[in-house]
Image: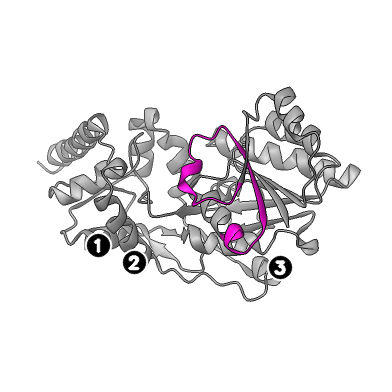
Amino acid sequence: MKVLFIGGTGTISAAISRWLLEAGHELYLLNRGNRNNVLSGGAKEIRCDISDEAGAAEKLKDLTFDVVADFIAFTADQVERDYRLFKGKTKQYVFISSASAYQKPPADYLITESTPLANPFWEYSRNKIACEDFLLNKYREEGFPITIVRPSHTYDERNVPLGVHGKNGSWQVVKRIIEGKPVIIHGDGTGLWTMTHNSDFARGFAGLLGNIHAIGEAVHITSDETVTWNQVYAALADALDKPLKAVHISSEFLGLCGKSYGFLGGLIGDKANSVVFDNAKLKRLVPGFTATVRFDQGIRRTVEYILAHPECQKEDLEFDAWCDKVIAAQEKALKEVTG
């Protein structure tokens, strides 16, 4: 297949790019070229900023593709731009949406692709829903060949997937565990969640490319494994060979205290809700697909990688101080109530 990725070097897309190259497909990456070194080579680069529509159109004028996938579109105007650029130039356009678009709070813990899309808590999710609405209308009205993919919490060797962290990622939480400091877990930690390793995601995604049964469909790609947030943090501490000093704090309280970190959306509109994904549709579209990386195994790989790569260790002293302040506030309130 001749495939174009807009982006192509992120947590999700880099794994898919590697998979396609190893499988012998012709892969083009349209991006600014800032992170293409994360791939071992073989992809053809189209260097431009996709937001410069005229410049992108000029670069693409003589090219057609079997598949175009956009990993960096977040708003309706961006997918409208893609529609203008790729109408008549691709047999399949894949939009990467988000499982956070599903109904919040959920009416049922089991999520299928027919679960309503509605998230009043997170603008990011509402924007993804608007993108989906535009594309579905183009499919229905004009036959524009879309496939919508909804990832949930997907991780790789470069990032530790957690519920509460600062603007520089999860390293500061890892560092707190290493140093024996308490770490915050939202709620009581018993909420159900799904973590998906990017290598598993890549195999499911690749099976949808060039798949005639995926045209006009929306499908999520996740692991079948369900973990609690307590298990997530315990697995991280175990991989670090350190004890876990967990402090459970109300998600609502964290959302209000952590507005600058986006916790109102990221927690209340996503991670504070228990969700279990039914992957029957994906398995019907991609026979034989199964996620094989168990979370405790995947997080161990991640820990080994980030400890060996200082560039992944981005300190966040502001978030560290915020954690201490929030923990102290809860302890003070408890003392005042209990005497």
Residue 14 visible somewhere in the drawing: yes
Mark 3 or 2, nearer chain start: 3
- Contact, mark 1 vs mark 2 (Cβ under 8 Å): yes
- Circle 1 crowding by C-alpha within 10 Å: few under 14, some 14–19, many from 20: some
Where does residue 116 sit, x and y in percent of width and height?
67, 51
SS under mark 2? helix
Q: Which residues are magenta?
A: 19-43
Left or right, 106 with reference to 149 = left
Q: Position of residue 171 (x, y in %)?
A: 28, 44
Return the mark for residue 296: 2
Q: Which residue is mark 3?
A: 285
Three-letter amino acid code of the residue under disc 3: Leu
- Quarter of the figure with residue 137: top right
Q: Which residue is mark 1?
A: 239
User: In what element is the residue under mark 3?
Assistant: helix
Q: CA distance from mark 3 to mark 1?
A: 35 Å
Does 141 sit left or right of 336 as displayed?
Answer: right
In the displayed structure image, the side of residue 156 where residue 189 appears, left or right:
left
Disc 1 element: helix
Q: Earlier in the sequence, mark 1 or mark 2?
A: 1
The residue at the point 38 percent across, 32 percent down is: 261
